[in-house]
Amino acid sequence: MILAVLQKLERPTTLSKAFSSGCISGSIGRKKYPRPLKTKKSGIDILHDPLWNKSMAFDMSERDRLGLRGLIPPAVRTLEDQILRTIDHLRSQPNDVAKNLFLQELHNRNETLYHRILVDYMEEVAPLVYTPTVGTVCQEFGHRFSRSRGMYFSLDDRGKFSTMLHNWPHDNVHVIVVTDGSRILGLGDLGVHGMGIPIGKLALYCAAGGIAPHRVLPVCLDVGTNNLSLQQHKDYVGLRRNRIQGEEYFAFMDEFMQAVFDRWPQVVVQFEDFESSKAVPLLELYRHKYRCFNDDIQAPLPPQHDLLYTTCMFSVHHPVGHA
């Protein structure tokens, strides 16, 4: 097994500060020094994996250990050099949607650089990754779709959810943000095109909350859409049928939740942008059974997300402190 020491994002967060001050108790704390990361990949496979790829930021010793010498230009560009060049390219884009697409492409090839840009330029970049820009991105999701991120569970997959979850390559997922696309921001029913919401929100959680990118999973549930214009649009990437309702809907959700917690018993699930007629009963069904929450209903302030996540992770049965 090849051992690579790759640069990791280390930024103080509400969570890490709470641990260091002793405000939050738990058997797991933040380590003072980053650990080496292990990978079985080498050569071109490293460069094609956005979680490992650092492009020209690999130093010569890393290039030799990982079989990268000759696969990238000989000059070494530090992460700081890459950040400055990337932010210049980002600012040269003509509008916010173009900037979002630029960031998506970066996300798909170099997650180290992508999340460092988010960390260092949070005030400037967060509105491009999430609200308000993400609303337009969701509306154009099918037209601009180029590479899949996260997982999709559709009505055609019923009975196979548990098996499907083993298609996800990472064994230690900590946080899932899931939507059924029924109430995306103020835009209504966008079906599977609402996937932009979980992707954007988890990017912010990684950057601002210190969660490792390989430990989050954006999920979209395709239970149909009642948006007829989407059903008829050539670029729609979901099932072209009306939404299921009633017992059929809740059976679908029950299979999903059971499969998720069978695969990752300690995961935290956030319900995102479900219509109220589904969001409230779903939370009541699962809040005392699984680690889950819905910030549209429970409405924590943004700085409280770290604390809520921590409470969920260290709670034995369910999150506490919110009714």
Image (spheres, grey):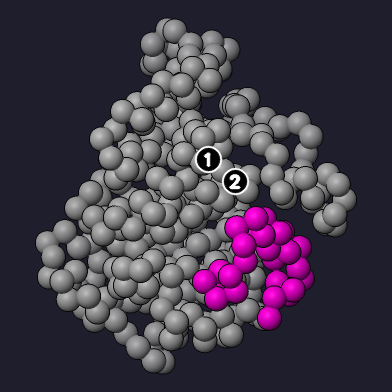
| Residue bearing mark 1 | 122
Within-10-Å neighbours for mark 1: few <14, some 14–19, many 20+: some
Q: Compared with residue 301, is residue 275 higher up or lower down, i.e. above or below? A: below
Q: Return the residue nearer the eye: 121 or 222.
A: 121
Compared across the picture, whether 293 is left or right of 13 comes to left
Identity of the amino acid at label 2? Ala
Looking at the rendering, the stretch of residues picked out in magenta corresponds to 294-323
Q: Is 70 on the left-hand or right-hand side of 6?
A: left
In the picture, the disc for residue 208 is 2
Query: Magenta span has 313?
Result: yes
Residue 71, above or below 307: above
Give the image quarter of residue 307.
Answer: bottom right
The residue at the point 38 percent across, 16 percent down is 71
Look at label 1 and name its amino acid. Answer: Met
Q: Farthest right residue?
A: 22
Element marked by disc 2: helix
Name the N-terminal-most of marks 1 and 2: 1
Q: Quadrant of the N terminus?
A: top right
